[in-house]
Amino acid sequence: MTRVAAVDCGTNSIRLLVADADPATGELTDLDRRMTIVRLGQGVDRTGRLAPEALERTFAACREYAGIIKRHGAERVRFVATSASRDAENRADFVRGVLDILGVEPEVITGDQEAALSFTGATRELTGRADLHRPFLVVDIGGGSTEFVVGDDRVRAARSVDVGCVRMTERHLVVDGAVTDPPTEEQIAAMRADIEAALDLAGETVPLGEARTLVGLAGTVTTISAIAQDLPEYDSEAIHHSRVTRAQVDEITARLLHSTHAERAAIPAMHPGRVDVIGAGALVLRTIMERTGAAEVVVSEHDILDGIAHSCAAGAR
């Protein structure tokens, strides 16, 4: 077995997976999987720079992760950074800080690379399922961007667009430094128009209407699944490969967009770091389902993080 460590650093969260990989098949056995909300992308859409406090939150998480990686004795480590660090003028500060702490240089990957890793992580367990029809449309709703990937056993087309739960919240729902609580109808309409334009852009590359199964990834989608199931707490096993109908997504999105901070925070499965951005993320998912005509979304807890770990294992073989 090869012990690998994968780190996925996005706009809203940073996540770690330490796993043993079978050298023959590449199958992963999780040893440690965790997530920390660091909001690295705080203000990036407005300023074009990573804020000092956002960098420090991220570096603090990296120091914690370095200890975990060392304790497990991972042989190979890969650190991938996505939307926020792609957009930032001062990303060299981020790269230098991560290298100093973890001893590996973060790879600031392109949207297409991000999409391919997400597809691998999300569909590896689904390809043999008789109840799921191909091609898959994998949608990864992140903090700063959303990735669209269509494929069967491999990627056929992919596109990353700059709509994510943090970016949409900061662009449309923040007034005088505070998130509007709840947002106005005008703010929701402006946000939706932005999402629709991004879907037009994605559709130029990815045949959104050809997919037979919609697979949703990342915290927005998994949290919506938890709400749909009325879970008393976040439960990865109950969420992984669950299915949420279009009607459920419509109802939950409306509820989240018209609730207050306190009401959203009181939802048992809601991570505190998602309270202010979950409404925007839900609107992204609902708009995608409307555009594609998907009757349901298959929710996956396995995503780009697993794709990164698979790539580590492949490099060791």
Image (cartoon, grey):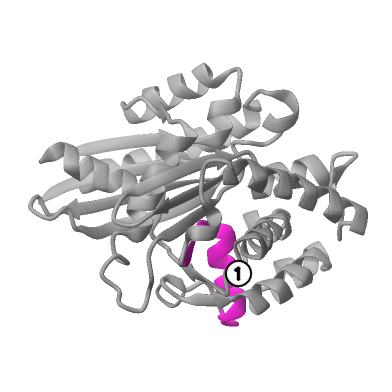
Q: Amino acid at mark 1?
A: Ile
Residue under numbered circle 1: 224
Q: Provide residue 278's location: percent of width, then percent of height.
A: 68, 59
Horizontal and vertical percent for residue 293? 61, 67
The image shows residue 136, relative to residue 4, as above or below, that is below
Q: Is residue 190 above or below residue 161?
A: below
* Residue 176 placement: quadrant: top right
Residue drawn at x 37%, y 65% as measured from the top left = 134
Name which quarter of the figure residue 34 lies in: bottom left
Is residue 122 magenta-colored?
no
Residue 41 placement: quadrant: top right
Foreground pick, 306 / 38: 306
Residue 189's x, y, as percent? 85, 54
Secondary structure beneath label 1: helix
Which quadrant would the C terminus be assigned to in this image? top left
Q: Is residue 75 visible?
A: no
Is 297 left, or right, of 150 in this rendering? right
Q: Residue at x 67, y 36 (%)?
A: 42
Q: Is residue 232 or residue 302 the one in the foreground?
A: 302
The residue range painted magenta reads 213-232
Residue 98 seen from this side: yes
